[in-house]
Image (cartoon, rainbow, N blue to C red):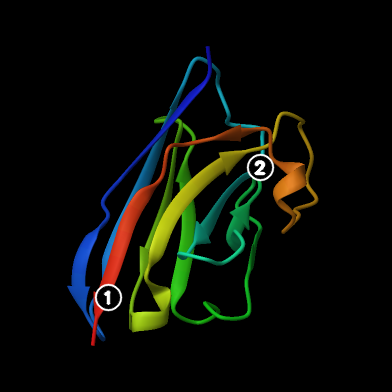
Amino acid sequence: QVQLVESGGGLVQTGGSLRLSCAASGRTFSRYPLAWFRQAPGKEREFVAAINWSGGSIYGDSVKGRFTISRDNNKNTVYLQMVSLKPEDTAVYYCAADSAIRVGLASSVNRYDYWGQGTQVTVSS
C-alpha cells in the first residue's frame, strides 16, 4: 500500500522560510515524478513544483525563484524548500507521485495518482 506522508508545515511570518518533506512508503519512487500542490480555502488545488528522477524540475509561476523542490531517492523522500514566504502562500500543501516512469513533468493534478494527506502552511502578515 502506497503512502505519502508530509511534514514540516507550520506558522511562519512573512519573509520567513519552511522546509516541507514528504516520505513515501509501499513503493520505491526513485524513477517516478514527484510533485507538490497546494490548496487554499475556497480555491482549487494549485500546482507548485514537480521533479523527475534525474532532478529536472518545473515550478508554478507564483513560486518561481522562491521555492525549490528536491529529492533524495535513497530515502524515497521529496522536499520543498520555501523562502521569502508571503501570506498568499498560506494553504494546505500536498505531495503527489506519478505512477509511471517518465522524464516529462506535468502541472496537472490528473497526472498524479498518489497523494499525501497534506500539511498546513500559514504565513502571517
For marks 1 and 2, give the one nearer the viewer.
Answer: 1
Query: Pointer 1 and pointer 2: residues touching (CB < 8 Å)?
Result: no
Which mark sits nearer the N-terminus, 1 or 2?
2
x, y percent for residue 90 = 37, 71
Q: Is residue 7 above or below residue 67?
A: above
* Residue at figure coordinates x 58%, y 50% from the top left: 35
Q: Report how far apart the C-alphas of labels 1 and 2 lie in the structure.
A: 28 Å
Q: Residues within 10 Å of mark 2 (few under 14, many from 20)?
A: many
Which residue is found at the position 52% from the left and 11% from the top? 1
Question: Compared to 26, does 65 lie above or below?
Answer: below
Which image quarter holds the C terminus? bottom left
Which residue occupies 31% across, 62% down?
121
In percent of width and height, residue 13 lies at 19, 80
Q: Secondary structure at mark 1?
A: strand
Tell me which amino acid carries mark 1: Val
- Which of the 4 quarters of the picture holds residue 98? top right
Identify whether 125 is placed above or below 29: below
Does the image show residue 44? yes
Is residue 34 or residue 125 the one in the foreground? 125
Residue type highlighted by circle 2: Pro
Q: Which residue is mark 1?
A: 123
In the displayed structure, does residue 7 sit left or right of residue 25?
left
Closest to the observer: 11 or 97?
Answer: 11
Mark 2, residue position: 33
Which residue is outermost to the top?
1
- At numbered mark 2, what does the secondary structure look like: helix, strand or loop? loop
Counting from the top left corner in percent of width and height, residue 83 is at 33, 76
